Amino acid sequence: MNMLTKVCGMTDGENIRAVEALGADLIGFIFYRKSPRCCKAVPGYLPSRAGRVGVFVDESDDGIFMKINEYGLSHIQFHGSESPGKCLKFRNMGLKIIKAFPISSVEGLDAAAEYSQTCDYFLFDAASPSKGGSGKSFDWHILEHYLGSTPFFLSGGIGPDSLSALRSFSHPALAGYDLNSRFEMRPGIKDTAKIKDFLKDLSCNEQN
């Protein structure tokens, strides 16, 4: 099974075009105002092949609808305390739903159970005092205790030096990887050379 690759926190049109050309499956736009990667204006280019993911943290429905229309979003990623009902509401509109969960212990997986019928994917990230991603990794062995059927993205601190660890990690529900801050030249601008090398090595790993 080929892993999906989601490159998140993008803000610049030509940078988006270049990353999409490398084969990224999903491009993420963060609409959380406190994030240094918050996408404050529609970029000059939006992906035509890769899916468009809007990342929200406890945003109002009206605010989400506005971004869906402005960006032509195909996926919604909820990174706050959104309820299963809210996830289902947007899923019933035909959008793919990703719900993020901060993980620091086995107990952190418990919250995911009540979302199993309302989301297309989960995203397991490192727990952080602030909402949104932390750019740090967590103990992936915790995910051995995840027995759900909802596929998940692995997130948190994945970088160019993570390939060895990724090769040794497997899970039947693993759907893909979320790449962000460790592939950047500066917040919101990705280093395409690093992403290219990573995706090439990842592809070789999957074929072996």
Image: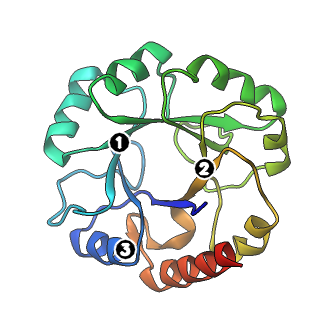
Task: Tell me where residue 97 sits by quadrant.
Answer: top left
Q: Is residue 68 left or right of residue 170?
A: left
Q: Amino acid at mark 3?
A: Val
Report if the CB atoms under discs 1 and 3 are less than 8 Å apart: no
Q: Which mark is residue 75?
A: 1
Q: Amino acid at mark 2?
A: Ser
The colour style of the image is rainbow
Residue drawn at the location 36% of the way across and 26% of the way down: 91
Q: Amino acid at mark 1?
A: His
Residue labelled with disc 3: 19
Q: Residue 86: where, in percent of width, then height?
A: 40, 18
**Pointer 3 or 2: first along the chain:** 3
User: For numbered disc 1, what is the local secondary structure?
Assistant: strand
Q: Residue 4: where, in percent of width, then height?
A: 51, 59
Q: Is residue 171 left or right of residue 39?
A: right
Task: Tell me where residue 17 sits by quadrant.
Answer: bottom left
Q: Which mark is residue 134?
A: 2
Q: Toward the viewer: 203 or 72?
A: 203
Q: Residue furthest top?
A: 85
Residue drawn at the location 71% of the way across and 70% of the way down: 162
Q: Is residue 114 above or below residue 98?
A: above
Q: Tell me the mark number nearer the camera, choosing from 1 and 2.
A: 1
As measured in the structure, the alpha-carbon distance from the residue carrying label 1 to the one carrying label 3 is 18 Å
Residue drawn at the location 52% of the way across and 72% of the way down: 183
**Pointer 1 or 3: first along the chain:** 3
